[in-house]
């Protein structure tokens, strides 16, 4: 029959047992030390007491006078007993140099030989010894009685060992009481401390805590979401590898203990991390990424900190933009197919009516309008991604009544762009700029615009967006201008901030992504007023030598 496995003692229980044993050992050690020290001290006190009594008796003039009489015992016995009673010692024995007693607590022993050593005293010294005499083992002092230089007698005063031991036993009782009190207080204090520890460790034992720590560390490194924990003073208490990457904290940099303000994050993101209220799925931009931020305060009677999760939204945002572009292209193609069907019916009807020349002129005019922009884009922009983007955006703009025009000085040779310049960044930059320009041109107004200025600059022509794409040996220039109302000077510094938009909530990410992509490639974005009166955005991206880029492209191909 297998016995049931018992759960290991909790960490608090283990610490409690160890602390009780430690306190008991310390108290026992202190008690033993106090007992030994007390015994030695009691013996020293007894020795000093009997030595003082013996020396005092030996130095007494009355003792010297009594020794010179024919019967010393008659005068010395009452005197010695009085001294013994006053000093509470066991005996005071006065004897001659032949060790014959003149005094003794037991009067029947007067006249007999003193039991003990006297050689050192006869030589003039005072000494101490422990000796077994008529009263049992005793601590005694023997000292000479001098009359000038002559030694005329000896004095021995002593206290029994049993008397000293009884004094130590009396002290030991008090010591045991104090030790028991110390042990009880130590046990109660240890129990209170460990009860608190048990609550904080949730009753787990050391192995469970160690395993929990290992799982905790493995989870932090394995999870792909960024995790950031801030304490009550808004300092970083914990950040995992993904969190470091999303916030731009170098792997070797010390992050714990730093405040959020020291991370040099964009102001909106810093505000979200420091917010006292919870934030749910907020989009924020860092220098290179789009992150989704969720925060929740840790509250337990008082604010203890904040838990922040970060998700990388960069790739998803780019894919969303591409999907929106594809949807726009699809809608444009559907609209163009519908318009083409209408025009084809018109041509067929004109032929049926016998107006062949008018049918030819109508069809030729429509083809020429569609072919002019295509020929200009293909001839000037040999980079296929940009050319396809411009043609698709031209179709979208046309459906919204906006003319998309490519500037005459546009020129991008095949191989002019290095492989390091990602096509996705080009689509992000140019696509978002054209979309914003088409919105502005089609609406004909924008925040901060002055109506009188807009009327003077735009005139009554068709809404138009002009794109310039030019690459030389040093840089790629992408410029997009529109005939919209433009952007007021007071808004010029805010247009690239995440959330800025004239189209309501949920918009305003495009220009922020443009600046992010430009900075990621070492470029810049500028905003000024277009000659037509609208806004003009200019992006400059540095390029390497054109020959080097072309060779790199050939090698890649």
Image (cartoon, rainbow, N blue to C red):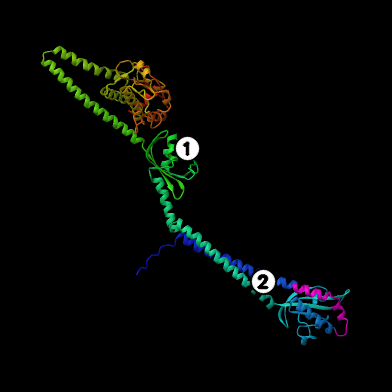
Residue 286: image quadrant is: top left
Residue ranking furthest to the top:
357
Residue 335 visible at all: yes
Q: Is residue 376 above or below residue 176?
A: above
Q: Which residues are magenta?
A: 49-71
Q: Position of residue 460 (x, y in %)?
A: 31, 15
Q: Residue 64 magenta-drawn?
A: yes
Decide which of tag 2 and tag 1 comes sooner along the chain: 2
User: Where's the C terminus, which quadrant?
Assistant: top left
Question: Residue beneath label 2, please?
Answer: 39
In-image side of 214 versus 363 (left or right): right
Residue ranking furthest to the bottom:
108
In-image side of 21 versus 288 (left or right): right
Question: Residue beneath label 1, please?
Answer: 263
Determine whether the residue tagged by mark 1 lies in a helix, strand or loop: helix
Measured Cα–Cα span from mark 2 to mark 1: 68 Å
Q: Residue 384 magenta-drawn?
A: no
Q: Position of residue 59 (x, y in %)?
A: 84, 74
């Amino acid at each position: 029959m297998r016995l049931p496995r018992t759960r290991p003692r909790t960490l608090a229980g283990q610490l409690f047992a160890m602390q009780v044993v430690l306190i008991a050992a310390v108290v026992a050690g202190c008690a033993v030390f106090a007992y030994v020290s007390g015994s030695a001290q009691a013996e020293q006190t007894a020795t000093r007491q009997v030595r003082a009594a013996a020396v005092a008796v030996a130095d007494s003039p009355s003792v010297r006078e009594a020794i010179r009489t024919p019967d010393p015992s008659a005068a010395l016995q009452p005197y010695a007993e009085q001294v013994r009673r006053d000093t509470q010692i066991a005996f005071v024995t006065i004897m001659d140099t032949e060790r014959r007693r003149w005094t003794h607590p037991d009067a029947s022993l007067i006249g007999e030989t003193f039991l003990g050593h006297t050689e050192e005293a006869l030589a003039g010294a005072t000494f101490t010894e422990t000796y077994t005499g008529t009263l049992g083992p005793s601590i005694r002092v023997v000292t000479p009685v001098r009359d000038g230089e002559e030694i005329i007698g000896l004095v021995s005063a002593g206290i029994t060992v049993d008397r000293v031991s009884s004094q130590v036993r009396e002290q030991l009782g008090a010591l045991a009481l104090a030790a028991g009190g110390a042990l009880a207080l130590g046990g109660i204090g240890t129990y209170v401390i460990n009860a608190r520890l048990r609550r904080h460790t949730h009753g787990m034992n050391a192995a469970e805590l160690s395993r929990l720590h290992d799982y905790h560390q493995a989870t932090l490194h394995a999870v792909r979401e960024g995790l950031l924990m801030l304490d009550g003073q808004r300092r970083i208490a914990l950040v995992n590898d993904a969190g470091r990457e999303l916030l731009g904290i170098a792997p070797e940099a010390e992050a714990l203990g730093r405040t959020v303000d020291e991370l040099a994050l964009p102001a909106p993101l810093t505000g979200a991390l420091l917010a006292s209220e919870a934030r749910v799925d907020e989009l924020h931009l860092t220098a290179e990424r789009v992150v989704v931020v969720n925060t929740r305060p840790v509250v337990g009677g008082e604010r203890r900190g904040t838990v922040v999760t970060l998700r990388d939204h960069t790739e998803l945002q780019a894919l969303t933009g591409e999907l929106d572009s594809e949807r726009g292209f699809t809608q444009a193609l559907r609209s163009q197919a519908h318009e083409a069907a209408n025009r084809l019916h018109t041509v067929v009807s004109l032929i049926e009516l016998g107006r062949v020349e008018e049918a030819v002129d109508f069809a030729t005019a429509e083809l020429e309008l569609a072919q002019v922009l295509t020929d200009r884009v293909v001839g000037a922009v040999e980079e296929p991604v940009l050319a396809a983007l411009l043609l698709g955006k031209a179709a979208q703009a046309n459906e919204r009544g906006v003319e998309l025009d490519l500037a005459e000085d546009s020129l991008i040779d095949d191989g002019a762009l290095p492989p390091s310049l990602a096509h996705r960044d080009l689509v992000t930059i140019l696509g978002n700029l054209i979309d914003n320009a088409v919105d502005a041109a089609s609406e004909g107004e924008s925040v901060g615009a002055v109506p009188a200025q807009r009327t003077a600059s735009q005139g009554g022509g068709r809404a138009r967006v002009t794109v310039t794409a030019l690459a030389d040996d040093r840089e790629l220039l992408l410029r997009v201008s529109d005939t919209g109302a433009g952007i007021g000077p007071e808004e010029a510094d805010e247009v690239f901030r995440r959330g800025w938009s004239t189209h309501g909530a949920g918009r305003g990410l495009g220009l922020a992504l443009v600046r992010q992509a430009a900075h990621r490639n070492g470029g810049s974005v500028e905003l000024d007023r277009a000659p037509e009166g609208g806004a003009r955005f200019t992006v400059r991206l540095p390029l390497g030598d054109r020959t080097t880029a072309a060779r790199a492209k050939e090698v890649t191909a």
